[in-house]
Image: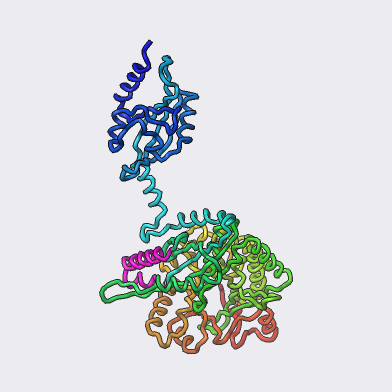
């Protein structure tokens, strides 16, 4: 019978001829000492002086329990192997290395071989680990700004929310949208636009303290996740100071410094059950309201994110439908050619028992944050359709316009609600006008375009609102099913003193007319603006110069006495062969 030393020598010789690094470990001793290492392993780890005190746990960042678990598995079944990935721990190794270890039990008919010995084969997988890490990081980073991209940022937000249950802290999602970025792109080129986005990204990143995160959703939209919020009321001051630094002029060339600003909105929550989509809708809506009210520091819609409050508050809105606290106001649309009213835009208002009369922008965020809000959408379309049908019965060709929300455009629910109203009309054609705002959320969305075309097929018309602002796309206008174009309100006032604005508006009107779309100008409150817009070829106007929004009851009372509202007659169906 061979001696123990002879058997070990044979095993060592067999290991030495292997090209794959391998070590022999004694699992019966503390820290798992290495009893033998083959030549390939010694070459791979030339910086390590192997001696009787060299252990597996001393070389690799791994606990003895982890290794013993693998060893136990292979000892119970020597014909099976077990893999694990470990990292080098020796300080003498300048750069960490990663290894895949395969554990193998030793079977022998000779009892002289120690049954506690385990053979560990080693494969250096450092490049594989680093490459995978690089790919993972690259896939989560916006390539232009170096900030987290949309997917990575939202993943981080979704991971953070459940942790609020233990941390009891408040987090805040902030939307930032650059102002007048498109004109800069148009005037100076996309290279300059990219340089601005890069600079803004770098400045935002530098402003992020521990725990806070910056990301870019796309285009000129940035997002922040703030986790060190003590008091929600402090956010406007914090954001104003931050953006003052971020929006410092950017040097483009030796002689050109570009100033750029932005709007922001934020949503806060302490609720670990809050949904990511609720936070996004809330912050987006807050930013939209801030754009409309630039003198305000920012608007928080925190209650939107608290789902318990959403349920209660949405229920109160739905109860308002039953108690007739919700009322439909109508904003007249006047034809400049015929000087007659050809339509009304619906502006819902809520006569709240506590807060008085609220315009839609004050309670719409609640509706958008709940599926129950669709009941309001249905009420609005049905009410508008009934009024439109009544006007037809009385001989008037008056279009009734409603503003579609992003949710309605995303799910197409407005088509079904319109279809339900077909029986209101004598000819079955639903005479409603749908106003939409151009948005990257549905741009090139075949589903949305198809839904709008279905609405047109039923008798409806489509108006593109807010056209001509810095986000407008001329190619978008040519793609979407469209009947009218409404200019952004920023373009329809102070025209007399701004010749460049006049020329810009003239080009927008000419462009729209070439596409066959009449142009609407809203927010007309001055005689000078009205005169200029009429001379530029604008077709339709809305504004307080002559007609302000009126309640449905007020209009019905006026119609009992005269087929007019103010000094303008209502367009009769007999005057037109079509709408």
Q: Quadrant of the N terminus?
A: top left
Q: Main secondary structure of the magenta part?
A: helix
Residue 355 seen in the figure: yes
Q: Nearer the viewer, residue 33 or 450?
A: 33
Rendering coords of residue 216 (x, y %): 43, 61
What residue occupies the far top of the structure in this picture? 1
Rendering coords of residue 448 (x, y %): 52, 60
Q: Which residues are magenta?
A: 179-208
Q: Is residue 203 magenta?
A: yes
Count of marks overlaid on the render: 0
Q: Is residue 198 left or right of residue 388?
A: left
Q: Quadrant of the C terminus?
A: bottom right
Q: Residue drawn at (43%, 77%), measured in percent from left and top? A: 509
The quarter of the displayed image where residue 416 is located: bottom right
What residue occupies the far left of the structure in this picture? 254
Residue 429 seen in the figure: no
Q: Is residue 419 magenta?
A: no
Q: Nearer the viewer, residue 291 or 566?
A: 291
Q: Residue drawn at (38%, 45%), measured in percent from left and top? A: 132
What residue occupies the far right of the structure in this picture? 323
Q: Nearer the viewer, residue 34 or 167?
A: 34
Q: Is residue 449 above or below residue 239?
A: above
Q: Is residue 210 left or right of residue 560?
A: left
Rendering coords of residue 482 (x, y %): 49, 68
Q: Is residue 117 above or below residue 302?
A: above
Q: Residue drawn at (63%, 74%), measured in percent from left and top? A: 348
Q: Residue drawn at (39%, 41%), measured in percent from left and top? A: 87
Q: In this figure, which colouring scheme has been used for the structure?
A: rainbow
Rendering coords of residue 325 (x, y %): 70, 74
Q: Is residue 347 left or right of residue 448?
A: right
Q: Nearer the viewer, residue 528 or 221?
A: 221
């Amino acid at each position: 019978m061979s001696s123990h030393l002879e058997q070990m020598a044979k095993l060592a010789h067999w290991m030495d001829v292997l090209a794959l690094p391998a070590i022999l470990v004694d699992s019966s001793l503390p820290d798992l000492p290495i009893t033998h290492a083959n030549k390939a392993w010694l070459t791979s780890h030339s910086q390590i002086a192997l001696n009787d005190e060299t252990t597996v746990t001393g070389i690799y960042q791994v606990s003895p329990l982890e290794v013993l678990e693998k060893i136990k598995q292979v000892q119970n079944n020597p014909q099976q192997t077990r893999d694990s990935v470990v990292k080098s721990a020796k300080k003498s190794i300048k750069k960490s290395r990663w290894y895949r270890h395969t554990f193998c039990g030793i079977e022998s008919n000779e009892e002289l071989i120690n049954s506690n010995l385990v053979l560990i084969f080693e494969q250096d997988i450092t490049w594989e680990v680093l490459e995978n890490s690089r790919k993972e990081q690259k896939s989560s980073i916006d390539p232009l700004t170096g900030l987290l991209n949309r997917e990575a940022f939202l993943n981080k937000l979704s991971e953070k929310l459940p942790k609020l249950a233990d941390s009891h802290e408040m987090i805040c999602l902030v939307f930032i949208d650059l102002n007048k970025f498109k004109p800069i792109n148009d005037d100076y080129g996309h290279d300059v636009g990219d340089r601005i986005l890069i600079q803004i990204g770098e400045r935002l990143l530098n402003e992020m303290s521990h725990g806070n995160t910056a990301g870019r959703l796309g285009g000129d939209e940035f997002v922040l996740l703030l986790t060190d919020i003590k008091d929600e009321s402090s956010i406007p001051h914090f954001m104003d100071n931050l953006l003052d630094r971020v929006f410092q002029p950017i040097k483009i060339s030796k002689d050109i410094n570009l100033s750029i600003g932005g709007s922001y909105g934020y949503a806060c929550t302490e609720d670990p059950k809050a949904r990511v989509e609720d936070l996004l809708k809330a912050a987006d809506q807050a930013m939209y309201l801030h754009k409309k009210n630039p003198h305000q520091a920012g608007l928080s819609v925190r209650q939107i994110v608290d789902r318990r409050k959403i349920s209660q508050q949405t229920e109160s809105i739905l109860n308002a439908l039953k108690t007739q606290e919700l009322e439909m106001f109508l904003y007249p649309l006047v034809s400049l050619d015929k000087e007659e009213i050809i339509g009304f835009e619906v502006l819902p208002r809520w006569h709240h028992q506590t807060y008085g009369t609220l315009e839609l922008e004050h309670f719409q965020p609640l509706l958008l944050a709940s599926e129950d809000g669709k009941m309001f959408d249905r009420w609005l379309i049905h009410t508008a359709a009934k009024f439109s049908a009544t006007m037809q019965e009385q001989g008037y060709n008056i279009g009734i316009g409603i503003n579609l929300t992003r949710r309605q455009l995303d799910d197409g629910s407005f088509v079904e609600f319109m279809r339900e109203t077909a029986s209101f009309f004598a000819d079955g054609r639903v005479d409603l006008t749908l106003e939409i705002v151009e948005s990257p959320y549905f741009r090139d969305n075949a589903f949305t375009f198809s839904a709008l075309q279905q609405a047109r097929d039923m008798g409806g018309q489509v108006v593109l609102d807010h056209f001509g602002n810095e986000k407008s796309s001329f190619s978008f206008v040519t793609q979407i099913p469209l009947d009218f174009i409404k200019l952004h309100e920023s373009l329809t006032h102070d025209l007399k003193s701004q010749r460049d604005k006049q020329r810009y508006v003239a080009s927008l009107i000419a462009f729209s007319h070439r596409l066959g779309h009449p142009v609407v100008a809203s927010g007309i409150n001055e005689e000078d603006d009205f005169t200029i817009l009429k001379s530029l070829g604008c077709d339709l106007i809305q504004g307080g110069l002559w007609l302000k929004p009126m309640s449905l009851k007020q209009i019905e009372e006026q119609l009992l006495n005269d087929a007019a509202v103010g000094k303008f007659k209502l367009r009769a169906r007999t005057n037109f062969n079509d709408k």
